[in-house]
Amino acid sequence: MVIPKFKEMERAYGFEEVALVPGDITINPDQTDIDFTIGNFTFSIPILAAAMDAAVDPNFAILLHNFGGLAILNLDGIQARYKKPEEILAQIVQAPDTEVTSLLQKIYTQPIKEELIGERIQTIKRAGATCAVSLIPSNTKQLAPVAKEAGADILVIQSTVTTARHISKSYRGLIFSELCQTVAMPIIVGNCVTYSAALELMRTGIDGILVGVGPGAACTTREVLGVGVPQVTATMDCAAARETHFKETGKYVAVITDGGIRTGSDLCKAFASGADAVMLGSIMAQAAEAPGKGYHWGMSHPHPTLPRGTRIKAGIRAPLKQLLFGPTSATDGTENFVGALRTAMGVCGALTIKDMHKVKMVIAPAIKTEGKYFQAMQGMCSG
């Protein structure tokens, strides 16, 4: 008897399950081109700092700009709610584990102040840095014009899962096509993980898309809701949507892999999966200059009954410059991310990021353990 299936399931892959295949030619790493462009802005490294309060404040945004990247300031967060955000950050860092979630929920109930949005943006702009800001969809209509008037250059609209169509009985949802016409700045939207959702979002006129639901170190969406797709598959599917959209319209929408990247190898695999840039959260929170002082927490604490983020102790690993460019004595790929990308591109024969998209990948669950007996034993002993 043939038993009918209720539904079909596809195999999806994360960073730890795939490997990059070396190219037939190699290139000097220092000759690779890793520029990233969004709208009229070009950055010399394709790395964004996530719009999380533990990772980005105005000073950090200026610093990452000076190193060639882009930091996103969270306008739904502490910087826009409190005149002296450093005092609030200290409370979060010092809170006991048993009290921190309720404290975060309380802190994020303070209203957002438009004058603080202007102050933070102006601090970044006065330093000559590109200013990117993030808003949740429900606050975008009200606050995007405020951010634009204050001098923001790039707008990121971000929620756990974002679609071009939202059904609600209580309000008229944010219409991205209308926003693109009224706000004259590049718009990045996230997050999504499927071809169809990405393509529909791209057709609204946006300039970039964030890929990833639940892979972040401080995000508990997968555990609480069971929602998400591993990042290699998610990035590949959204990159396929980018190619379809480009063929349809001639407009290239940047794909940005957001979350789940812990090491240089993860970052390199994201680009081979089709990413134009990556967004880093916990890695940025480990920088000595990060406002979280070695702690990191998610963005969904304002939910009063179902917080989907947790504070983690990421630790302070190194200054931001060392995390990005080295030199490093770490052998686990947790520093010198730009060096890792350039080296992988050189080994795989990829001169540009678009060449990196064409690098062959194989399914290889044992890529990190094959022949690594002594490293594995050393890791067990140190743990």
Image (cartoon, rainbow, N blue to C red):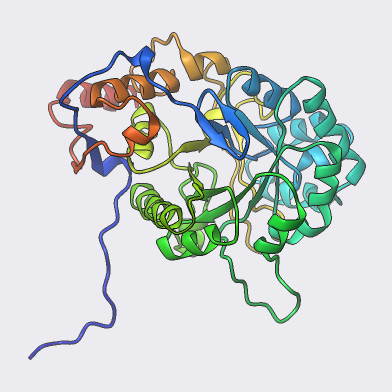
The quarter of the picture where residue 196 lies is bottom left
How many marks can you see? 0
Q: Of residues 21 and 324, which is closer to you in this image?
A: 21
113 sits left or right of 216 in the view? right
Viewer-side residue, 264 vs 246:
246
When the figure is inspected, residue 186 is found, relative to residue 125, above or below; the finding is below
In the displayed structure image, the side of residue 22 where residue 237 appears, left or right: right
The residue sitting at 82% across, 33% down in the picture is 120
In x, y percent, where is residue 381? Answer: 28, 23
Identified at 46% across, 62% down, the residue is: 227
Q: Is residue 97 visible?
A: yes
Instruction: Determine the residue positioned at 40% across, 57% down.
Output: 244
Residue 347 horizontal side relative to residue 339, left or right: left
Q: Is residue 281 visible?
A: no
Residue 175 pos. (x, y %): 68, 66
The C terminus lies in quadrant? top left
Q: Residue at x 63, y 57 (%)?
A: 307
* Among the 4 quarters of the image, the one containing residue 7: bottom left
Q: Quadrant of the N terminus?
A: bottom left
Residue nearest the viewer, comparing 148 with 110: 148
Q: Position of residue 66 (x, y in %)?
A: 64, 17
Residue found at the very far right of the displayed protein: 115
- Residue 217: image location, x then y, percent: 49, 41
Does residue 347 appear left or right of residue 328 in this picture?
Answer: left
Given the current orientation, which residue lies at the most extreme left position?
A: 1
Q: Residue 142: which quarter of the image?
A: bottom right
- Image height of 149 relative to 353, above or below: below
